[in-house]
Image (cartoon, rainbow, N blue to C red):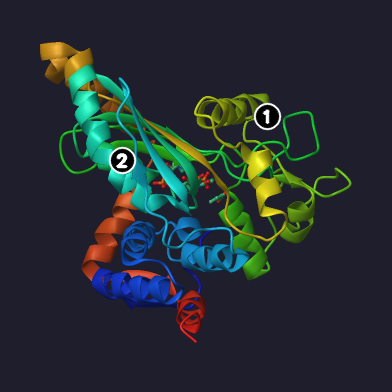
């Protein structure tokens, strides 16, 4: 949802980072957790991702109030097993665990051609594209997925089974901007539904049903009912894959179990998280530059028709934020400051 028309202020990236850090530590998080979370939510706000930027500081606060998340948990890096790097987040938030797991993931990927980072027992509430960009920045391709809470009905059904189950993909390109897409497999992200609810605006048609299974554009009614997958049965199958790959495969909770653990407390989901990385130099070998050039030709063919690549809106917002500062809704700024009371 576009909050750009809202009354906003401009804040420098350094100041927003400082504010986020101060608030998160005030909420009781250890400095390592607070720094890792601040980095990721500030990057989201910088890229004008309203549902997964500074707004998520409020989500962190709400999750902390549930008492379920361990604010001091130290991510435990397990011994690497073949291509698999595993970090047990020990019921802490995910960003620090991700930072702990990335270096061994990159090393394994370079050595074997592909690698998997499994993060277990983490509270995950961030966008996935920052994770993907950390890998494309190393010249790697990446595929990331995670369950959430069971807010989403399968195509043909009316009751929540899946999470909003985002999938993100990244492909390294020459220059600073990789090819990245990152989307929920639900018709709308839960964060966007929340923003509609906060703003008192209706949802787009077709994204949810009420508790009686009837189509609804009322965010509160859909929150009581269920959200729909995007693309009908196709989104439903992708959401199923996320439950399987980032749930059962890695021995962790799926979205239904995460929701049961929360027991109506209103916290962010707790489950596992899967990050896959691929080294093009190993797959394509010494011909990689030629194949990367073919990929560039395909991107040019997409753009040549007037279509845009995913993430181009974000990259434009990033450039604007660098020039003028980060745009932050004033109401959200005040709510974040109020967390210091
Ligand atoms: P959007 O529908 O806003 O965007 C999906 C993707 O499509 C983005 O990469 C976007 O790029 C791109 N895109 C949008 N419009 C176009 C277009 N016209 N042409 C080409 N590409 C386009 O994403 P969602 O609302 O589904 O998800 C938002 C965020 O929520 C994601 O970052 C996701 O990771 C996060 N999320 C996190 C969850 C969690 O459990 N942690 C759960 C669900 C979602 P651009 O950004 O440049 O517009
Ligand atoms: O927006 O769907 C969402 C979401 C779930 C967990 C974090 N974000």
Q: Position of residue 98 (x, y in %)?
A: 35, 45
- Can residue 291 be seen in the rendering of this structure? no
Residue lying at 18% horizontally and 44% vertically, measured from the top left: 176
Other-residue count near label 1 (Cα within 10 Å), few / some / many at <14 / 14–19 / ≥20: some
- Residue to which mark 1 is pinned: 232
Instruction: Indicate yes or no: mark 1 CB to ligand 1 under 8 Å.
Output: no
Task: Please determine whether, in this image, residue 99 is positioned above or below residue 167.
Answer: below
Q: CA distance from mark 2 to mark 1?
A: 35 Å
| Figure quadrant of residue 34 | bottom left
- Residue to which mark 2 is pinned: 101
| Figure quadrant of residue 281 | top left
Q: Position of residue 46 (x, y in %)?
A: 33, 61
Residue lying at 24% horizontally and 18% vertically, measured from the top left: 113
Q: Position of residue 31 (x, y in %)?
A: 32, 66
- Can residue 128 be seen in the rendering of this structure? yes
Number of marks drawn: 2
- On the picture, is 65 further left or further right than 9? right
Which is nearer the N-term, disc 2 or disc 1?
A: 2
Which residue is situated farthest in the bottom direction here? 341
| Circle 2 or circle 1, nearest the eye | 2
Task: Please determine whether, in this image, residue 156 is positioned above or below residue 67.
Answer: above
Q: Position of residue 295 (x, y in %)?
A: 25, 22
Please state which of residues 249 and 138 is positioned toward the viewer in this rendering: 249
Query: Of helix, strand and loop, which one carries label 2?
Result: helix
């Amino acid at each position: 949802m576009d909050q750009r028309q809202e009354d906003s202020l401009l804040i420098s990236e350094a100041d927003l980072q400082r504010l986020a850090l101060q608030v998160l530590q005030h909420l009781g998080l250890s400095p390592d957790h607070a720094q890792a979370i601040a980095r990721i939510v500030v990057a989201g706000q910088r890229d004008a991702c309203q549902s997964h930027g500074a707004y998520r500081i409020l989500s962190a606060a709400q999750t902390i109030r549930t008492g379920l998340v361990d604010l001091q948990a130290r991510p435990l890096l397990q011994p690497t097993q073949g291509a698999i790097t595993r970090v047990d987040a020990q019921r802490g938030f995910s960003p620090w665990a991700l930072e702990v797991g990335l270096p061994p993931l990159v090393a394994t990927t370079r050595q074997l051609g592909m690698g998997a980072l499994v993060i277990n027992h983490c509270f995950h509430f961030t966008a996935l594209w920052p994770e993907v960009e950390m890998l494309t920045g190393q010249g790697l391709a990446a595929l990331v997925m995670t369950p959430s809470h069971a807010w989403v009905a399968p195509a043909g059904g009316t009751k929540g089974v899946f999470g909003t189950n985002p999938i993100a993909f990244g492909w390294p390109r020459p220059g600073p901007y990789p090819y990245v897409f990152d989307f929920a497999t639900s018709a709308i992200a839960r964060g966007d539904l929340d923003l509609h609810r906060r703003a008192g605006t209706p949802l787009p048609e077709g994204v949810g049903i009420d508790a009686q299974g009837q189509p609804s554009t009322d965010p509160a009614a859909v929150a009581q009912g269920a959200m729909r997958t995007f693309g009908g049965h196709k989104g439903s199958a992708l959401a199923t894959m996320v439950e399987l790959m980032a749930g059962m495969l890695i021995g962790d909770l799926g979205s239904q179990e995460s929701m049961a653990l929360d027991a109506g407390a209103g916290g962010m989901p707790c489950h596992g998280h899967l990050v896959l990385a691929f080294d093009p130099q190993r797959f394509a070998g010494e011909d990689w530059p030629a194949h990367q050039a073919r990929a560039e030709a395909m991107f040019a063919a997409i753009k040549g028709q007037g279509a845009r690549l995913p993430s181009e809106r974000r990259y434009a917002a990033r450039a604007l934020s660098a020039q003028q500062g980060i745009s932050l809704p004033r109401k959200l700024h005040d709510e974040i400051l109020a967390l210091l009371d």
